[in-house]
Image (tube, coloured by chain):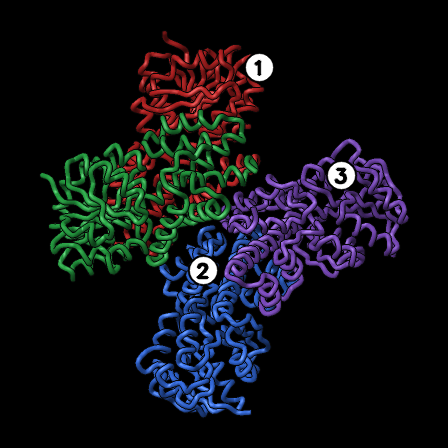
Chain colours: A purple, B blue, C red, D green
Amino acid sequence: MKHHIAFIGLGRMGQAMATNLLLAGHTLTVYNRSPDKAEAMRARGASVADTPADAVREAEVVFTMVTDDEVLRELTTGDDGILAGLPPDAVHASCSTVAPATNQELAMMHREHGSWLVAAPVFGRPIVAANGQLWVCLAGPNKAKSRLLPLLPSFSQGNFDLGEDPGAANVLKLCGNFMLGAAIEAMAEAFTLAEKSGLDRMVVFEFLTTALFNSPAYRTYGRMVAEEDYQPAGTAPSLLEKDLKLTLAEARAHQVPMPVANIILDHLTATVTRHSSADEDWTSFARRISESAGLIR
Amino acid sequence: MKHHIAFIGLGRMGQAMATNLLLAGHTLTVYNRSPDKAEAMRARGASVADTPADAVREAEVVFTMVTDDEVLRELTTGDDGILAGLPPDAVHASCSTVAPATNQELAMMHREHGSWLVAAPVFGRPIVAANGQLWVCLAGPNKAKSRLLPLLPSFSQGNFDLGEDPGAANVLKLCGNFMLGAAIEAMAEAFTLAEKSGLDRMVVFEFLTTALFNSPAYRTYGRMVAEEDYQPAGTAPSLLEKDLKLTLAEARAHQVPMPVANIILDHLTATVTRHSSADEDWTSFARRISESAGLIR
Amino acid sequence: MKHHIAFIGLGRMGQAMATNLLLAGHTLTVYNRSPDKAEAMRARGASVADTPADAVREAEVVFTMVTDDEVLRELTTGDDGILAGLPPDAVHASCSTVAPATNQELAMMHREHGSWLVAAPVFGRPIVAANGQLWVCLAGPNKAKSRLLPLLPSFSQGNFDLGEDPGAANVLKLCGNFMLGAAIEAMAEAFTLAEKSGLDRMVVFEFLTTALFNSPAYRTYGRMVAEEDYQPAGTAPSLLEKDLKLTLAEARAHQVPMPVANIILDHLTATVTRHSSADEDWTSFARRISESAGLIR
Amino acid sequence: MKHHIAFIGLGRMGQAMATNLLLAGHTLTVYNRSPDKAEAMRARGASVADTPADAVREAEVVFTMVTDDEVLRELTTGDDGILAGLPPDAVHASCSTVAPATNQELAMMHREHGSWLVAAPVFGRPIVAANGQLWVCLAGPNKAKSRLLPLLPSFSQGNFDLGEDPGAANVLKLCGNFMLGAAIEAMAEAFTLAEKSGLDRMVVFEFLTTALFNSPAYRTYGRMVAEEDYQPAGTAPSLLEKDLKLTLAEARAHQVPMPVANIILDHLTATVTRHSSADEDWTSFARRISESAGLIR
């Protein structure tokens, strides 16, 4: 069955997801702050709206995939925002990586408005989204989730239901991003030790991702760390710096020591402050270990 | 082709490997410091020697799988040690996790003696060894490695050749153990944050090891961390404490900062000093995060 | 010259400061949420008000010394709060350890109201306040600071002027608390290493605070750490946990890695979550090192 | 009373101490591996020997102040070393920062030789040694210490007796150096947070070393950190890197987690590997925080 869908936020991830929704035959209206990316979607068959409110006026479901909490809040509650246009009973699938409390708060506003918010953060790089192989965490009212489910296969290979509290999906998303960061940091430390001991980084990478960690995450990020080549940039370091800040803010609020998360955030911060690294993948924080070991000046 | 093989060191790992060598039809002579474990191997068809020297007198290959550097050194160079009995041209497959320098030093003594040392540390828990699914890192003289290769399939699913410097295989083994520790630490932090945020640890475990880290290492150790049940004890915390000390000694010697390795070692040390944890798996260092978060008293 | 002064917040620090203002001959009106502490001040000659608004109706200067940002905000801006009663041109000396932004925000509200806020956080334990030996950091409008200066000698030995931005004094206060925590953590690590090496903790304490760190902070906190006796409780661990959270929130906002601050906060959090430690001084986080080293179960 | 004294090791510290012993009227024979520094002492009235053995042939006391364990061991036990020339009953005052086990081992060899070793590490920078204001930790046989005591005032303001085990003095020295490092690291973090918050580093330095940490160590090192000017170089970063490695080796051997020591060592290692920093003081590791915060490229 085909649906009227709105998609707001057309970064690398959003574009790939929206394109797959189009390819699945849905009627799509898009909105993006910088209009050029929206035009690219128009060429593929989407309608382009001038405001979030206009984008969602006939939507059964609106997806948002934006940079951070502030942008999501503004797009949802601003004068021309989603809540200003969304029909009653429609579903807002909030896919961005934001604080659990942000989705909880917006969910409350949706409820007052007569619509629904489902937190639906996704795992996977843009290329994975393009291949329709993301993973989705879902949390929100069961009825709203059930209306979202038929749309997900166009861009994802599976989903997990975290219950009715929208915050839960974001906690899980933050945990996952942190764990990816921990794997990258561990590889940076191990490969650097190996290199300075006279081994070849790529041999170590091959062995470890064959014998111990044979999963796409380790192979994708591990190759970048082994080759110290952080192109193409799936996600910018500044975005993951934001994510790790959110992770540690949750950890502080819940009184959970996370020493490895602290290390990753510090390395991301140094990466953001020291380099014009926006054109490198966030994995490039691994370079901090090479630097500290004197391999890079 | 069947060979005369000696096996020294019959802990959980050694027994499983030696039993598989027996099952493959080789003639096996064993030695173990505490004789009861050797008797169990006699029942399976092995000869039992009173000293390492006696165990290796007719061996083409001798495997050692012992606790630490000091024991390996003593078994190899002591009065009744391997070098006192080993025939010329025989191969010593040194499988224990020891410092790279230890195997390098023993390799030199073998060369003077007219025999060969191949560093052959293995990855996998005892149950994996019993199933013949270990991974082996090999480093040493090519000629000696080629004589070892036909014996490995009895207990391993594959091997990696790290070249002729025996230290290289141990560096890789130390890197691998560190990376397993980093994965465990990351799960401990993530699952504890999830739990204190109201999520179920097992749900988080299921999602992350399905969507991001679908490898046996994450699933085996992750289940322990999620359930906080550290039985059965594959390897004792004190052994991994030793391994991380070796890792960090290499890191110091080569001037490589390894902040995550420091955290893991500190947690292992606290685990060893505070608990009679010998009957728990080393993974139990994950409990330090639950404690610091106030979930365990 | 004698002044009409209000004092709000009569914890251990507030009481000592207010008492010294009384002893200096000023006319004092006090307010405290739990009235028993206010009654103790009445016995010493203060008037007791039922609300913050009532307390400040005739005040030239009002001091606040309360638990955290939320309480300060409520006391200042609530229905019966300071701003509801404070005469024009009066000065609010905000002495609590709060986020720089909190004082900046309240300063703006004072300006609209025609009054002034001076951030005036203090350094020193309650006994030091009682002895009139605190140090005060001052930041706010110069005119307002100059009206505060004559009152300070009653409880302090000196003050530092940080300029006109009220946030600056709080940044410095957070830096100072962090540095005290770092000194405590370093002593915990050093004394524990010394103890496990066979030395007497007190001998080490005596030497180090004589030869290297002969300042009251090291001697006061160091004696507690050396003797592992954390009585009397100058400040509760939960208060410093809050302070370190504020410090790290500033660090995150300004992109400053503070690895030692992370360690201290994690130790404070573990102290707060694991113990009913409200009756011990915050210095007791030093015990985490003794625990991790297996000296305390 | 005047004595025959030998002094071996004429780096910045050794020269200052030896010169003060000369000024006190003792008969001094010196030895240094690079002879030019010995010639400078000859100009001040010392005799210059060609080997350590020759330097000590008539010595009642021989002081050593050298780079590391290996050099000390070689100078003491080598063919032309101290033990080859030292008269029976003479005292070897071992002032270098070395592992406790090194002095314990050399002490045993002295005992067999009929002479005595007293571990006598000192605290203070070269300028402090020149001013005769060092602090000395003493550990060794009481009789030998009592013969050393009259010589110390020429270069020190006081000493502490740690008992008869020579290792104890070195443990304390390692604790002290670590604590200095912790103070420097804490100032680096605090001053950088202050700077990025808009405060002046020097103002923060002035306040904190006046109000909280009014001791020479904080003022001397703190000024360097505040001004980010690490000249003159009292001690090279590589020497303190060695010291922190010794500290952490002791910590590992005694199972003591020292998270702050790990941070300091990692910063020292990065300082040594990345910069030609031999001409800067070890305090320059503080720069790592400015770098990570993006203030220095």
Distance from disc 2 to disc 3, alpha carbons, whole Å, reads 61 Å
Q: As shown in the figure, which amino acid type bears the numbered disc 1?
A: His
Judging depth in this view, the residue of D143 and C117 nearest the camera is D143
Total numbered circles: 3
Q: Which residue is mark 3?
A: A113
Position of residue D169 measured from the top left corner of the image (x, y, whole percent): 24, 49
- Side of C268 relative to D12 (left or right): right
Q: Nearer the viewer, mark 1 or mark 2?
A: 2
Position above or below: B263 against C66? below
Q: Residue at x 59, y 55 (%)?
A: A184
Q: Are dots 1 and 2 on a single chain?
A: no
Q: Which mark is residue D239?
A: none
Judging depth in this view, the residue of C64 and B221 nearest the camera is B221
Q: Which quarter of the picture shows residue B63? A: bottom left
Chain bearing mark 2: B
Q: Quadrant of the C terminus of chain C?
A: bottom left
Q: Which mark is residue B250?
A: 2
Q: Which residue is mark 1?
A: C113
Q: Quick check: can you spot residue C273?
A: no
Chain bearing mark 1: C
Q: Are dots 1 and 3 on a single chain?
A: no
Furthest residue to the top?
Answer: C1
Distance from disc 1 to disc 2, alpha carbons, whole Å, reads 64 Å
